[in-house]
Image (spheres, rainbow, N blue to C red):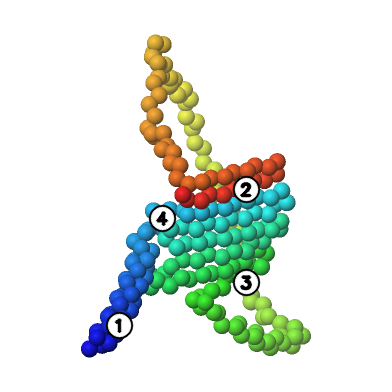
């Protein structure tokens, strides 16, 4: 009996551990759904601009969104981004953009079918086409222009003079701003900015 009780305790302990792991996974998945993209905080961010024109940026958010992109001197870009979908699975998309257009790839993206080869159409040579038939068009009859009729000239009446508004001399216009000054918010974290004559580097990590 003692052996059975001990085995039962081991079984119930492993079952409890599994229940706890499942609950933690469900809680982390629910956390992604609760955090809206508008209110998700940035956990880390990096940006740089080199003197040769290359540029790069990357950031990660607390809702699971991650982004990374780099561009070369010719403006061609390549990068990737990922997110957590409503089912709790992480989706990743890699892309390139440049003179060949925008191309994206991912395991969850549909693949377009291959385009069909164009079929040649028969076009007869011009010497085998019959000439177009000309249709007879009657010439319009001559109609003399109408004779102008005499109209007496109207007498000139000068327009009334406009009176311009003249403000009083002792009036002082007061400026009343309608937009309140912006509220500047500095998120808690460690920020580092280094400037060079032809570029910069910027990093941020939330504390």
Q: CA distance from mark 2 to mark 3?
A: 78 Å
Residue where numbered disc 3 is placed: 137
Q: Which mark is residue 11?
A: 1
Q: Earlier in the sequence, mark 4 or mark 2?
A: 4
Q: Residues within 10 Å of mark 1 (few under 14, many from 20)?
A: few
Determine contact: label 4, label 2, CB under 8 Å: no
The disc, 2 or 1, on the residue closer to the chain's N-terminal end is 1
Mark 4 crowd level (few <14, some 14–19, many ≥20, 10 Å Cα): some
User: Residue at left 35%, top 69%?
Assistant: 24
Q: Which residue is mark 2?
A: 201
Say whether residue 133 is visible. yes
Q: Earlier in the sequence, mark 3 or mark 4?
A: 4
The image shows residue 143 at horizontal and vertical percentages of: 58, 57
From the top left corner, tell me how far across and down residue 1 is, in percent: 22, 88
Residue visible at 62% across and 72% down? 137
Q: Secondary structure at mark 2?
A: strand
Asked which secondary structure carries label 4, the reply is: loop
Q: Badge 2, how many Cα within 10 Å: few under 14, some, many 20+?
A: some
Q: Nearer the viewer, residue 157 or 115?
A: 115
Disc nearer the start of the sequence (1/4): 1
Residue at (45% x, 42% y) in the render: 186
């Amino acid at each position: 009996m003692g052996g059975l009780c001990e085995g039962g305790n081991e079984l119930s302990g492993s079952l409890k551990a599994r229940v706890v792991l499942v609950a933690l996974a469900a809680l982390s998945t629910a956390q992604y759904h609760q955090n809206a993209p508008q209110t998700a905080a940035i956990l880390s961010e990096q940006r740089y601009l080199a003197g040769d024109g290359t540029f790069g940026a990357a950031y990660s958010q607390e809702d699971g969104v991650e982004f990374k992109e780099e561009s070369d001197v010719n403006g061609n870009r390549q990068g990737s981004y990922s997110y957590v979908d409503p089912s709790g699975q992480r989706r990743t998309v890699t892309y390139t953009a440049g003179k060949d257009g925008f191309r994206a790839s991912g395991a969850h993206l549909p693949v377009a079918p291959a385009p069909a080869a164009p079929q040649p159409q028969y076009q007869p040579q011009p010497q085998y086409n019959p000439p177009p038939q000309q249709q007879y068009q009657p010439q319009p009859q001559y109609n003399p222009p109408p004779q102008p009729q005499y109209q007496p000239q109207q007498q000139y009446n000068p327009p009334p003079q406009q009176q311009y508004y003249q403000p009083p001399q002792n009036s002082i216009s007061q400026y009343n701003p309608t937009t309140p000054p912006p509220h500047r918010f500095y998120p808690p974290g460690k920020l580092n900015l280094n400037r060079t004559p032809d570029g910069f580097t910027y990093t941020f990590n939330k504390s």
